[in-house]
Each structure stands twice: as structure tokens, then as C-alpha cells.
Image: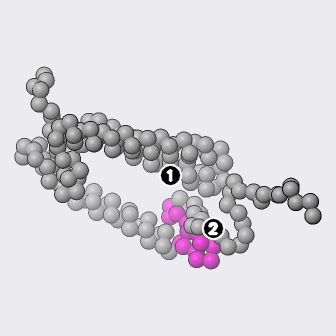
Amino acid sequence: ITTGQPNTHVGHNPGSSYAIFAMFGLVIAVVVSGLLLANGSEAFEEVHGLLTYILLGVVVLHVVGVVIHTVRHRENIIGSMITGNKVAAPEAGIRTSSPVATIIFLSVLAFLAVGLYRNYNPTTRSTVLPVFATTLQLGESEGGDEPRGHRNRVDDDDDD
């Protein structure tokens, strides 16, 4: 039943929740297609680019939705994201936090960060992703190898 009053959500409203799940899924798809591309699977080049543009589109739509919601409902969503405070009924709040999930997330993040640091080779300016064993080139190599997709340009106008 519609009361004419907007529903106040302590967390994301349903539309924002869909956008968040779409962004999470798209980030995973962009990373996976990028890893496959880094391993020499050129077939994923167009898929990787397309997924990246779709992700950017969802991000833009989400930001536009936040701005529209903020203006329409006069609710400072951005401020509540920064401070963590939002005006709502106490029973609508989060009842308990999950320190176990936080510890697991931070542990996985630390494992990946330490693995990237330990696998870094300053000579080749590359590192290997832990678990995935995929080599990532960080910057251009100094050995004269050109990045994939670039070819030497031959100047046909030089007749000397």
C-alpha cells in the first residue's frame, strides 16, 4: 500500500542493490576476461572491452540514481556513506556486525597483497598473481619488446 511517503532504507534501496550486484559481477567478469587475455587468449579482447564499457555504464547509472534520489527525497545519501550515520527508526538498523566476515575479508586481501609484493620482479617489472599464477606486466619492459597490438610502423614515403 502506498502512503505517499518514501520508504527509508538504512542500507541500499532495492534499485541500488541491483546496481551493486551488477557491478560486483561485472568487476569479476572484467578481471577474469583480463586474466584470460593476459594469458594470450586474444579471443577475449573484445569481450573484455565490452564488459569494461558495460561496467562504466552501470557505475554512471548508479551515480545518477544516487543524485536523483538525493534531490527528490532530500536525503543526504552521500553524507551518510561518508559518516555512517543516517536518520531512520532504530529497529531498521543493523542488529549485529559480523567480525568474522571482516577478518576473513581482510585476511584474503592481505594474502593477495603480500603475494603480489613477494612475486614482484624488478628486472622484468612484472608480478605473478597468487593462486591464479598469472603474470602481470607492470609498465613497459626495457628490452625493446613492444606491447601486444602495436607493430613497427614502416614509413613508405622515405625514398632515400
The residue located at (63%, 55%) in the rendering is 39
Q: Is 121 a magenta residue?
A: yes
Residues in magenta? 119-131
Between residue 16 and residue 129, name the one nearer to us. Answer: 16
The kind of residue on which mark 2 rests is Glu
Mark nearer the viewer, 2 or 1: 2
Write down the quadrant of residue 101 in the picture. Answer: bottom left
The reply, left or right, for residue 51 in relation to residue 67 is right
Q: Position of residue 22 (x, y in %)?
A: 39, 41
Instruction: State whether residue 99 appears in this view.
Output: yes
The number of callouts visible is 2
- Residue at the right extreme, as displayed: 160
Q: Which residue is mark 1?
A: 31
Q: Are marks 2 and 1 in contact (CB under 8 Å)?
A: no
Q: Position of residue 141 (x, y in %)?
A: 65, 70
Instruction: State whether residue 97 appears in this view.
Output: no
The reply, left or right, for residue 86 in relation to residue 54 is left
Between residue 150 and residue 131, name the one nearer to us. Answer: 150
Q: Which residue is mark 2?
A: 140
Q: Position of residue 29 (x, y in %)?
A: 49, 46
Q: Secondary structure at mark 2?
A: loop
- Label 2 or label 1, whichever comes before in sequence order: 1
Point out the image quarter for the C terminus.
Answer: bottom right
Magenta span main SS: loop
